[in-house]
Amino acid sequence: MKKTARLLALASLLILPRAAAEANWTATGRFTYVDREYDQTGFTGAEPQLSVRYADVHILDSKNKILASGATDASGNYNILVVDSSTRTVYVRVTSRSVNTSNLWIEVRSTTANNYNHYAVKSANLSNHGPNVNVNFGTLVALKGQGGEAFNIFDQMVRGVDYIASLRGSRPGSADNLIAAWGINRGITDSTYLRATRTLNYRDTAGYDDTPILHEMGHYFVTEFSGTDNPAGPHTFSDCNVDLKLAWEEGYASYWGNSAQRFAGLPRCNIYMRSNGGPGPGNLVRYADLETDTQYLCQGDTSEVSVFELLWDINDSAATTDTTPGVDDAPDAMAEPDIQNYEVMRDYIPTAVNKSMEDFWDGWFKAPISNGFLSQMRSIAAVVGVNFVEDALEVNNSAATASPITVGGGFVPATFFYDPDGDGAGQADTDYYIFSATSGQPYKAETANLVSDGNTLLELLDSDGSTVLASNNDRAPGDYSSLINWTAPRSDVFYLRVTHAPDLGVYGSYSVAVSPN
């Protein structure tokens, strides 16, 4: 058994005599921890005591021998029978693990290394305790800096596994046990999920950052109960154009973590807050409002903010315990149960390659899931620029059906999305445009305003609609729009063909224009 860290919290000991003759006694009491409430400004300064739920409790003697074990209940209470016939010094201890709760396989350790400790809170020693004398150890509190952070992490993990149970029907079993590693001075500056060991590795200042704690549990959920292609790497809410796979999973993890808060009925469940861990009110590093983002204003599914806002609005309702309880924000047109999102994660996402918001979108609509609500989904997606919808010029996927484009008429908006059966799920799209040119006149054909993965390959075609006269993929290194400068060899009609350049995704938005040069 690993050595357990013992952080002391004192309480008065109430000794209750017992008349029975057998050499047994009962230990009772309660464990709590000091919490820190937060909102979009950081910590509010309110520090209520919350129950240490479902954690292991041990009754020990002065030699640290365990005499009996049990666990706290949902209110932090315990009631443990001790079989003992000796008079001895005894004390009670709660530890940050859940061996004694049959369907809960979580623990908080001091490090990811093999010489880890669990966190603990213990009572004062009770000397000369005789058999047949019950003891109520009272309420013992894990204070800030004395176990409070570790038991807050433990409590968020309980919330997380209970949210999983609401989706899957049961808490994760022993084969999916979950470990959290945290320490106040470990030198860890970024929180991560270590897949190989199912370990949530938390930065030093994360002890009371509930939603970042649950965000990392979101990665655990995706990895163990869905599928992941997350390439990892740097990201933040202000990064509007990152790898599709990275934006998807980071956005989903935030959605998942705040959804666990919403499932628990906690206030301000729409607020994601990261702090610097400092004492007192404030200490905000960043926040996001999953219901109505007004800070980052990113567009498209290359942004994790767009991903979590879209996913949140699928399930959000007036009943959500957010910052405007009883009121749903205007863009919302849906209030679907979380299980519908989970069906996509369970049944479709594992089969997808280069998993992204595109795959969630298709999985939502495709049989046998067929969740529907097409107009509502398009409405909430449009708010964040995720335009997985045919543009107004469809169907223009051949030279015979090419859309006329006016030279000098400005940019024409378009999407890479083709939905011939109208079910909402899309497929790859190629767009053709036709224009008239004058012999000897120089022209500029270009794409711009790329949103989501609107990575364009632009080709100029001759009058036959097939012979390629010029082409351009990227306008410049790192600029995935396209530009062709060209002089018309004769007065005639010519074509532009816009296809999605080889990339992770197949959807996205762009604009196209032809102008005299």
Image: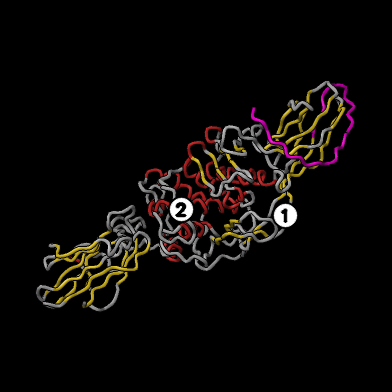
Q: In the drawing, does residue 437 fall left or right of residue 380?
A: left
Question: Residue 355 or 424: which is nearer the viewer?
Answer: 355
Circle 1 — which element?
A: loop
| Residue at mark 1 | 47
x, y (%) of residue 473?
A: 25, 61
- Identified at 14% across, 65% down, the residue is 469
Q: Residue 16: give x, y in percent of width and height.
A: 88, 33
Residue ID at (75%, 41%) = 31
SS majority, magenta: loop
Does the magenta run of residues contain 505?
no
Task: Say which element carries label 2.
Answer: loop
> Callout 2: 10 Å neighbours few (<14), some, many (20+)?
few
Q: CA distance from mark 1 to mark 2?
A: 33 Å
Query: Could you tell me which quadrant the C terminus lies in?
Result: bottom left
The residue singled out by tag 2 in the image is 234
| Residue 9, magenta (yes or no) | yes
> Which of the 4 image quarters holds residue 51?
top right
Mark number for residue 274?
none
Magenta residues, as a range? 1-27
Can residue 391 be seen by looking at this rendering?
no
